[in-house]
Image (cartoon, rainbow, N blue to C red):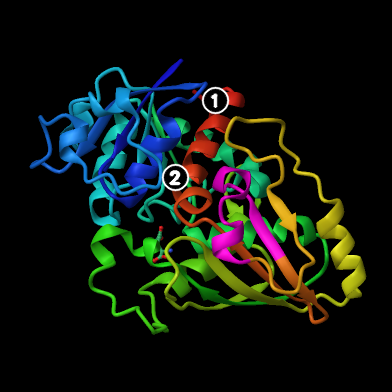
């Protein structure tokens, strides 16, 4: 078993990490970190557990430590659910201390030697770990993108071989994307907020890196433009998005590509049976009905129309955050990078 920890274990994404790692076939969850005021408490006393499933018993007994690299004794991998401002230093310290960091934070995503990975789309970018090792780091940092970017890029996997130059996307994002702290500040009931700070820029630049080509020394960005418009809507979990692409092939050909697509990866514990579920019902996908498909890891695609236009939807804190990092870590183990 690989010994793992979670940085920032009490927040919305941290709790999802704990839920996914509590009984994992590769990983033994041994360390949980949180802010100074939680350090020294049992996890069950430090956390305000807000998920739909009960707090796993064995994890409740773990004593929470401070979020510092020197508190992570004998840990092989840490999963980071830290806010970006904290993550910059702590993740770099962990990597220097020989720990593999699988991060959901945004701070290192665009660094030239840090892989930004969605396994179904660019598993080969994990080779960038070698650049970090060549530069003298004993551990490594591997990141997953912003949740909206994950739904978008997974939905593009089956159709990426069609030629297009212009990708437009408008999101409808759930309130859990703002974390437990962000929710009370939002006047979201009976409302739509047409602004999520930094989100549009992240979708635009992260998509190009993920769908770009890694030539062994750097990533050459994907050769198309991305224009995003992001909105917060009164949904608890599940980010939806409308996507427009200037693909010239007939819609029937694109539908076949969605239907016939096979994920290129071999089986991994968190990889769902279907990474993309292509739906033909006129009123789907819907967050409430479809977000838990594939234990929250499937991205549903529907409303495919000429144009090309479609809707993609997935669970933002599972597929879009904690599940994405755990899947990256499984791939890292599978490919022998540990
Ligand atoms: C939201 N997507 O829904 C954001 C949260 O870059 O990981 C995640 C931000 C990020 O507000």
Image mark for residue 322: 2
Residue 112: where, in percent of width, then height? 48, 51
Does residue 254 appear left or right of residue 166 in this picture? right
Mark 2 falls on what kind of element? helix
**Image location (x, y in percent) of residue 1:** 46, 15
Disc number placed over residue 251 in the picture, else none: none
Residue 264 or residue 165, whichever sits in front: 264
Q: Is mark 1 within 8 Å of ligand 1?
A: no
Q: In the image, 257: left or right of 108? A: right
**Does residue 215 show up?**
no
Q: Tell me if 137 is positioned left or right of 124 in this view.
A: left
Q: Is the residue 308 above or below the residue 332 in the image?
A: below
Q: CA distance from mark 2 to mark 1?
A: 17 Å
Whether residue 82 appears in magenta in the rendering, the answer is no
Query: Residue 298 at what x, y percent from top left?
Result: 63, 50
List the residue tagged with mark 1. 333
Stretch in magenta: 286-301
Rate crowding at label 2 as few (under 14), some (14 to 19) or many (20 or more) other CA atoms within 10 Å: many
Q: Is residue 63 visible?
A: yes
């Amino acid at each position: 078993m690989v010994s793992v920890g979670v940085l920032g274990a009490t927040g919305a994404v941290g709790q999802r990490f704990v839920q996914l790692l509590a009984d994992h076939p590769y990983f033994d969850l041994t360390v949980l970190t949180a802010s100074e005021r939680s350090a020294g408490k049992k996890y069950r006393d430090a956390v305000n557990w807000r998920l739909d499933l009960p707090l796993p018993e064995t994890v409740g007994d773990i004593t929470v430590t401070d979020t510092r690299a020197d508190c992570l004794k004998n840990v092989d991998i840490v999963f980071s659910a830290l806010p970006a401002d904290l993550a910059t230093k702590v993740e770099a310290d962990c990597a220097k201390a020989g720990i593999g960091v699988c991060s959901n934070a945004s701070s290192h995503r665009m660094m030239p030697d840090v892989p930004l990975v969605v396994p179904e789309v660019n598993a080969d970018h994990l080779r960038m770990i070698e650049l970090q090792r060549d530069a003298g780091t004993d551990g490594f940092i591997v990141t997953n993108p912003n949740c909206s970017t994950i739904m978008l890029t997974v939905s593009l996997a089956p159709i990426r071989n069609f030629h297009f130059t212009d990708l437009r996307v408008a999101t409808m994002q759930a309130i859990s994307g703002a974390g437990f702290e962000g929710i009370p500040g939002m006047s979201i009931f009976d409302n739509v907020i047409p602004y999520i700070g930094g989100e549009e820029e992240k979708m635009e630049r992260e998509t190009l890196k993920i769908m770009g080509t890694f030539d062994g020394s750097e990533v050459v960005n994907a050769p198309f433009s991305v224009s995003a418009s992001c909105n917060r809507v009164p949904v608890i979990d599940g980010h939806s998005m409308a996507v427009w692409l200037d693909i010239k092939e007939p819609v029937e050909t694109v539908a076949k590509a969605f239907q016939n697509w096979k994920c290129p990866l071999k089986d991994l514990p968190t990889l769902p049976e279907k990474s993309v579920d292509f739906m033909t019902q006129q009123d789907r996908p819907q967050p409430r009905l479809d977000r838990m498909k594939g234990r929250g890891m499937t991205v549903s695609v529907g409303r495919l129309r000429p144009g090309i236009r479609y809707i993609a939807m997935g669970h933002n804190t599972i597929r879009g955050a904690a599940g994405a990092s755990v899947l990256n870590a499984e791939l890292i183990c599978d490919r022998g990078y540990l």
